[in-house]
Amino acid sequence: MPTVRILLVLALHHNWPLHQLDVSNAFLHGSLTESVHMKQPPGFLDDNFPTHVCKLKKAIYGLKQAPRKWFETLTGFLHELDFTTSQSDTSLLIYRKNGIFMYFLIYVDDIILTGNNSHSLNSLLTRLHQRFRMKNLGTVTQFLGIAAKQTKTGLILHQSTYAEQILQRAGMLNCKPVSTPTTTKSTTAESSKDFDNPKLYRQIVGALQYLTLTRPDLTYAVNRAYQYMHQPSVDNFEKLKRILRYLRGSIHYGIPISPGNLQLSTYTDSDWAGDVQDRKSTTGYCNFLGSTLISWCAKK
């Protein structure tokens, strides 16, 4: 996700076109280099040889090699076009030649493409369409379940629909909002009895973890909730409900992506033995590219 945010900042800063691509039946494009056999599928049984097996020539869905083979096929095709793999993120491929820059970001079958030369981008899109069954979805509007909303200054990445689904799962879609996800008041060691539905607690906290991709304001609170996944108490669930009440009042929050001076700046801090139960520290950091927050972390 930091790579996605950085790529969007670069495209907005330089006013580059952004293309979002989707590959139809991506795993079927992978070529196999080893021998793989499978049983005859239902409906295609050979009555004369019912015990024979099929030898696969290409990958199919359900094959454990399929994701890797698809990635190898796609990146191999791009390498033939003089793309190189980024050393910091293997899902990003970069083209640098004669003053032309193109960036190709892959996540399974979802792709973001941008660059400084429209003619080269269109030429690449043509060759991709000839090689793979690929759809050009236009400018980026949604990527990995994250919506990208156009604004006067750039983009806002948000997960409002996903947040509503979390609240609905927890039965708190109509709860009363609060202004903060946690209380600042220090608490003593937990003495409450065990929560009677730990599965629900784990499901909600796990769902909130994915929501933190666009909600850094929830990262610390979700980090705290995660520390009680093995045996949540009633008090832990009450604190989780406060996170959900805060989410109800801030459901449309997100990360603004804005063009800037592309200066990288980092802020970090630690609470120094702030946990009253085990006296361990929680550290956190956030990285900005210009005025855009591109990565952050809260870790015990």
Image: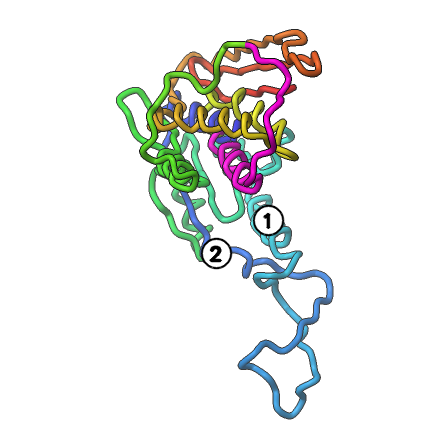
Q: Closer to us: mark 2 or mark 1?
A: 1
Q: Please report the bounds of the magenta region as a residue range.
A: 186-212
The C terminus sits in image quarter: top right
The picture places residue 135, in percent across and down from the top left corner, at 39, 51
Residue labelled with disc 1: 71
Instruction: Please indicate, yes or no, whether residue 89 appears anywhere in the rendered image.
Output: yes
Q: Which residue extends farthest bottom? A: 48
Q: Is residue 22 left or right of residue 80?
A: left
Q: Are marks 2 and 1 in contact (CB under 8 Å)?
A: no
Q: Amino acid at mark 1?
A: Phe
- Please provide percent x and percent y for residue 295: 53, 22
Q: Nearer the viewer, residue 50 or 30?
A: 50
Magenta-colored stretch includes residue 75: no
Closest to the observer: 136 or 217?
A: 217
Q: Quadrant of residue 116?
A: top left
Is residue 219 rendered to the left or right of residue 142?
right
- Circle 2 sits on which residue? 132
Is 100 situated left or right of 229 in this image? left
Q: Judging from the image, what secondary structure is the residue with disc 1 in?
A: helix
**Closer-to-camera residue (252/296):** 252
Q: Position of residue 161 (x, y in %)?
A: 36, 38
Residue type pointed to by label 2? Phe
Residue 99 appearing in the image? no
